[in-house]
Image (cartoon, rainbow, N blue to C red):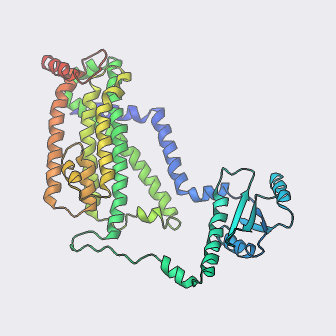
């Protein structure tokens, strides 16, 4: 057991002290803080002078209502009625006296039409604002000409009252589904990124030790199973350290910005109403998913002796993770689909898909228990096979180009 902890601590500390790990964490923490303060950052860069738009109103009627609606919508935009000609207004824009020039006239049906001039039209934010407000004025004028009362028009375009009600008492409400969907999104992305990132770390670590010829000493002093799981858990602790750091910093920042983070996406990802059991299932399936893929990554990493070959042999595992992720994205809209139900019992897909079903649906406890048992059995079988492959694989040197090296590794494990 002492050798197990030595390998575990060595794996953890070696990775923890690397410059790439420290720099990546610093950048990630800065991104978290930056995202929490994104509104303030945008306002800081957008704190320019008021944008003035010259308006040549040939109708004599549109300017006043347009000025009122635009300035109520965009506080940094000011419309000024231009008294000169269109050519003079264009020259004023070129000399940057105005941000833009808007020419308004009537079309053949006596409705407003406009032309927008600016030095650069790559940014469409200002032109879109002017177009939208002018469109509202046109609609009001057209309905008035047709004899339609404005209040009747508003009533016609008012959204229909539509409420979705689940008949089963245990079924989740629409609000609960939205909150559960937010947590499912977070866990799916975390599991997807963690499996690929830390799985590669495990495989690279083993390949690196084989490159330095340290593996012969390690394999002779510690059992393959002990060494393999020491590396898996060492990288797992590294991941927990990293994720824990992100969560702590993110929580502190969110607490400070809690009053600002309301509405829109923040309501969509609200986690206040999610049940404790959903969080427990999230942790369980996250850990089981990591152990399953990490065991597979350690086994694959033992087959290569050059760091350059790691990515090639890891591709099958990455494809499995990607397939599970894409099915989960599809299942977010139809979690009760038979396809999602069946694939949720496939061990490599279970962590994402079964958690998706647990979060979005009210499924029997025995189904969840069955999926966990299947995963535990799969991890056990993969660990037993992985230990044999690992024992022989770590003694294999040379280029590993395909999965046919499994057979060679198993044969070497019988001799070692």
Residue 382 position, x and y percent, is 18, 35
Give the x, y percent position of residue 184: 33, 56
Which residue is drawn at the image coordinates 22% and 22% (left, top)? 404
Q: In which quarter of the image is residue 365?
A: bottom left
295 lies left or right of 61: left
Quick check: 254 left or right of 373?
A: right
Which quadrant of the figure contains the N terminus? top left
Query: In this picture, is 379 found above or below 185?
Result: above
Residue 103: horizontal and vertical position, in percent?
76, 63
Which residue shows up at 23% across the image and 59% down it? 336
Q: Write down the quadrant of residue 117 in the picture.
A: bottom right
Q: Which residue: 24% across, 62% down?
A: 361
Q: In this view, does 54 lie to the left or right of 70?
A: right
How many labels sit on residues?
0
Q: Which of 281 and 404 is in front in this view?
A: 404
- Residue plotted at (50% across, 47% down): 29
Residue 361 is left or right of residue 272, and the answer is left
Query: In this view of the protein, can residue 50 be seen by the observer?
Result: no
The answer to whether any part of residue 31 appears in the image is yes
- In front here: 93 or 275? 93
Which of the 4 quarters of the picture holds residue 109?
A: bottom right
| Relative to 265, residue 188 above or below | above
**Image quadrant for the C terminus?**
top left
Q: Where is residue 139 in the image (x, y as percent from the top left)?
A: 60, 74
Considering every residue shown, the one lying at the far top of the view is 398
Above or below for 13 versus 30: above
């Amino acid at each position: 057991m002492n050798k197990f902890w030595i390998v575990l601590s060595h794996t953890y500390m070696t990775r923890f002290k690397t410059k790439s790990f420290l720099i990546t964490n610093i950048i990630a923490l800065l991104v978290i803080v930056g995202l929490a303060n994104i509104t303030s950052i945008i306002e800081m860069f957008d704190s320019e002078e008021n944008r003035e738009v010259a308006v040549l109103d040939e109708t004599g009627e549109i300017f006043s209502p347009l000025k009122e609606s635009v300035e109520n919508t965009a506080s940094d935009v000011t419309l000024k009625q231009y008294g000169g000609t269109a050519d003079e207004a264009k020259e004023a824009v070129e000399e940057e006296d105005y941000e833009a020039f808007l020419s308004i006239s009537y079309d053949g049906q006596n409705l407003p039409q406009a032309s927008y001039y600016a030095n650069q039209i790559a940014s469409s934010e200002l032109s879109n604002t002017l177009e939208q407000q002018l469109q509202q004025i046109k609609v009001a004028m057209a309905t008035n000409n047709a004899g339609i009362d404005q209040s009747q028009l508003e009533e016609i375009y008012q959204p229909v009252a539509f409420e979705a009600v689940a008949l089963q008492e245990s079924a989740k409400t629409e609000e609960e589904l939205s909150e559960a969907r937010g947590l499912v999104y977070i866990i799916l992305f975390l599991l997807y990124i963690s499996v690929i990132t830390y799985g590669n770390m495990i495989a690279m670590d083993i390949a690196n030790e084989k490159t330095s010829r340290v593996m012969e000493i390690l394999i002779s002093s510690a059992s393959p199973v002990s060494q393999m799981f020491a590396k898996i858990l060492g990288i797992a602790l590294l991941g927990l350290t990293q994720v824990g750091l992100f969560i702590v910093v993110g929580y502190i920042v969110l607490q400070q910005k809690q009053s600002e983070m309301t509405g829109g996406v923040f309501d969509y990802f609200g986690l206040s109403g999610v049940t404790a059991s959903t969080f427990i299932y999230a942790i369980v399936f996250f850990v089981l998913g990591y152990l399953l893929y990490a065991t597979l990554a350690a086994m694959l990493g033992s087959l290569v002796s050059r760091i350059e070959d790691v990515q090639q042999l890891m591709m099958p595992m990455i494809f499995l993770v990607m397939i599970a992720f894409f099915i989960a994205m599809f299942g977010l809209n139809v979690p009760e689909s038979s396809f999602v139900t069946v694939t949720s019992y496939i061990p490599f897909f279970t962590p994402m898909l079964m958690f998706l079903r647990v979060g979005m649906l009210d499924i029997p406890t025995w189904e969840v228990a069955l999926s966990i048992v299947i995963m535990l059995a799969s991890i056990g079988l993969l660990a037993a096979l992985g230990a044999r492959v690992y024992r022989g694989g770590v003694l294999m040197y040379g280029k590993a180009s395909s999965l046919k090296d499994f057979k060679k590794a198993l044969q070497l494990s019988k001799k070692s």
